[in-house]
Structure formats: structure tokens, C-alpha cells
Amino acid sequence: MAVARRRRSPDPAGPVVILQRDPGPWTPLTISWLATLALIVIFGLVMLFSASYTTGYLRMGDSLYYIKSQALYALIGVGVMFVFSYVDLRFIRRLVWVGYLVSIGLLVLVLFCEPLNGCRRWVNIRGLPTLQASEVVKFEMILLTAHIASRTPHLVRQGGPGLKRTAQDAGAWVYQKLVRELLVPLLPLVPVVVLLALEPHMSGIVLMCAIVGSILLLNGSGGIITYGGAVAAVLLLETVLSHIDSIPYLQDRLDGWTQDLDKMTDQTLQSLYAIGSGGLTGLGLGNSVEKQLWLPECTNDFIFSVVCEELGFVGALVVILLFVLLLVQGFLIAFQAGDRFSTLVGVGIMAQVGWQVFCNVAVVTNTLPNTGISLPFFSSGGTSLLLLMAEMGVMIHIGRSGAKAAEARRARQLEKLRAQEAAREAAKARQAARPASPPIVLDLRRPDW
């Protein structure tokens, strides 16, 4: 018989607080990850200035228009990252359902705001900075999915490995894997997907599903069902997209996803021109031609094209390798976290960065249809940068608290070993203190007859 049991994680040390005075020690892994992040942020600001000063001058009358706001958001983001690195993740976990309701409210509010570029994706209130609601929802869905997945009990078979699987046992397995581990964590995603489709924001839907799917996949939720679904989604993606004709907004993007230069969208065509012009080493920093109002959204979704044009294949490879290094170090930090919830939050944050980088590079190279997915830390956008820096602060907290938990585990193990050693020494002392018994002498000589 199979029953569901919840694996108990060790009790957290100390009471739950908002801000922790000392989350834990800094490890070499966390420091190196933070150094990689600093390089990416600085690199992104330099490339944004190079890609935006022409557009800023010609459209806004100020060459520094884009970089000034982005640099300001970056400075504020550093402060936000510092604060979130001290926020107790257990306190954030208690607010996940409140945050979910707020996120749904923002997605509903967006539908009543003025559209920008034909879409209702921003909370646009006069006199206040615009807020892209989907960026807030990404962070919230990471926290909520990690919360639900970490609370899901695991299925444990009883009766020994030789027990034959009965019908009741198989039914319990299907219910556990399909309903409790997959359907329950996916239920909060349904209203989010519906509201994003009404904006419309198809790229946001793709990212939300990819992030949630990555958390469930690496958590082992659903077992073979999840792995099979992931493989099927990859294999059937192009087929499904080619048969979507009921959504004009999406169909226009798909019609331009082709290798025929005459049918390709102008934005994708100019992006490929920029990439091809860069060659191996590029035209030089600041020497892009496509950013002279030829390439639309060169400061946002297509900034990687400018990177390729100015720095060439070598520069583009450096950017990709920096992100790969950030992801590898981030996943290692997540896997060394002190509890399952922290691990899944770290996995979700790194999955968000990884999927955004992959989709952005795939779009500008015409590997995927043209979608509005920004390049993290490079693309212009205050909301995205602030929330990303907040997530990076959470990653720092996960790394430091994981090191603190590891130290506590080592201390407990050392104490246990010392107790065992003391018990052995006490046993030896008791053995030595016992009085010696007289020797037993056996007289085996035959009597004298």
C-alpha cells in the first residue's frame, strides 16, 4: 500500500522576523555569484547607453534620456537587493496568498488602463511611474508555486520492495502524482494565464508556464508524467503554433516567423542585418548603424542585436557565458539552501533569468517568433530591473541562510560524534574500574593411585 507522507524539514532556528540581523556567513560561492551579477549589471548599463543615446537624442532631445532613468533604477535596485537580502524568507512565505491576490488585482486593473503600443500591460496612472504588472506576477508565482510544491507530501510505499502493486496502490499513485503534485500547484496559474491573454501578453504566458514548469520539474512533482509532458511540449510547440489562427495578434507574429526575407517582419529583418554586420569582433562600441532608428526597440527587446553588431560574435559569446555562469552559480546556491522552499524559490528565480535570456536571444536570431521578452539587466525598463534586483537579494539571503543551516548541521553532527565518543570512553572507564576476578585454575593432572 502507498501512503502520502510529508518529509519534515528541520525546524528553523529562531523566531520568524521581518528583517534578520545576521542571515548567515558569506560563502565563496555567494561572493563569486554576486561578482558575476555586478559584471552583468555594469555591462548592461554600458550597452544600454551605447544603444540608446541616438534614439534618446532624436526622439526625446536628450542623449542621456534612457540611461539616466536606468542608472537611477539600478542604484535604487542595489538598495532593494540589500534590503531583501536581510528579509526573512519565512516571513515572505506567510504572505504568498496575500501577494497572489494583489497580483490578480493588478492584472485586472491593467485591463482598465490606457493601452500602450496596442496592449494593456502597464498600470498607467497619471502622475505615477508606469508599472508592468506581469513583472510583479512572475515573482509572486515563483513564491506561490514553491510554497505549494514544498508542502506537497511524497508518496511512500509500504510493505517492502517485493510487494506487488495493487489497483488501490496504483490509484493512490495516480492521484498523488497527477492531482496533488501537478494539478494543485497549477491551479493558481489558470487565472493568471486568462488575464494575461486578455491584455494580450502571450510572451508573459510563455514565461509564466516555463517558470512554474521548471519549479515542478526540478522538484520531481508528477514524476514521469511531468517529464513526459515537458518532452511533448517541446516536440509539439511548432505544430501548435502553426495552427493558431484564431488570435489575430498572435497570428501576425507567427506569419512573420519565416526564413523568407520578403515575408519576415521588418524588426526581425533589421535584427538579422545587425547581427550579420557585427561579424566576429563587431563594428566597435558605439558604432552600430541599426540603432540609428532602423531597428525598432533597440533599447529594449532587441538590445542583444546591438550587442552583436558592436561587439560581434565574441561580445555576444561573452554575454551568454556571463549569464550561464550566473545561472550555474545560482542553481548551486539554491541546491545548498537550508530547506526545500528556499531551494525551489532559488530554482524559480534562476529559471526566470534563464528562460528570459534564452527566449530573447532566440527571438532576435529568428529562432522563435517575435515576442516582447526583454534581456535581463540589459533592456530598458525600471519595473523589470527593480524586481530582478529584489529577486537577486532573495538569492543572497538563500545563499547566506543555507550556509548558516549547513554550519548548524555540522555543529549537531560534531556534537553527536562527541557524545558517542564520550559514551565509548565512559564504557571503557567502567570496564577498567571493575575488580579483577581470581583466575580459574584447572588441575588436569591424574590422581596418584
Image: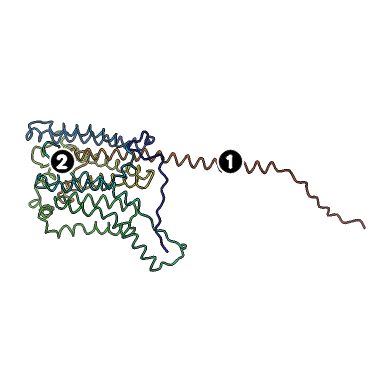
Q: Which sits earlier in the primary sequence, circle 2 or circle 1?
A: 2
In which quarter of the view is residue 427 placed?
top right
Q: Please name which of the two marks, 2 or 1, marks the residue nearer to the observer.
A: 1
Q: Quadrant of the C terminus?
A: bottom right
The answer to whether 312 is drawn above or below residue 369 in the figure is above
Report the quarter where the N terminus lies: bottom left
The reply, left or right, for residue 7 in relation to residue 253 is right
Give SS at disc 1. helix
Which labelled disc corresponds to residue 422?
Answer: 1
Tell me the kind of residue under disc 2: Asn
On the image, which quarter does residue 22 sit in? top left
- Residue in view at x 20 percent, y 48 percent: 104
As drawn, 151 above or below 163: above
Q: Residue at x 38, y 68 (%)?
A: 167
Q: Report the disc number at residue 300.
A: 2
What colouring does the structure picture have? Answer: rainbow
Task: Assess disc 2: are there few (<14), some (14-19) or many (≥20) residues with their C-alpha within 10 Å of its C-alpha.
Answer: many
Q: Position of residue 68 (x, y in %)?
A: 16, 31
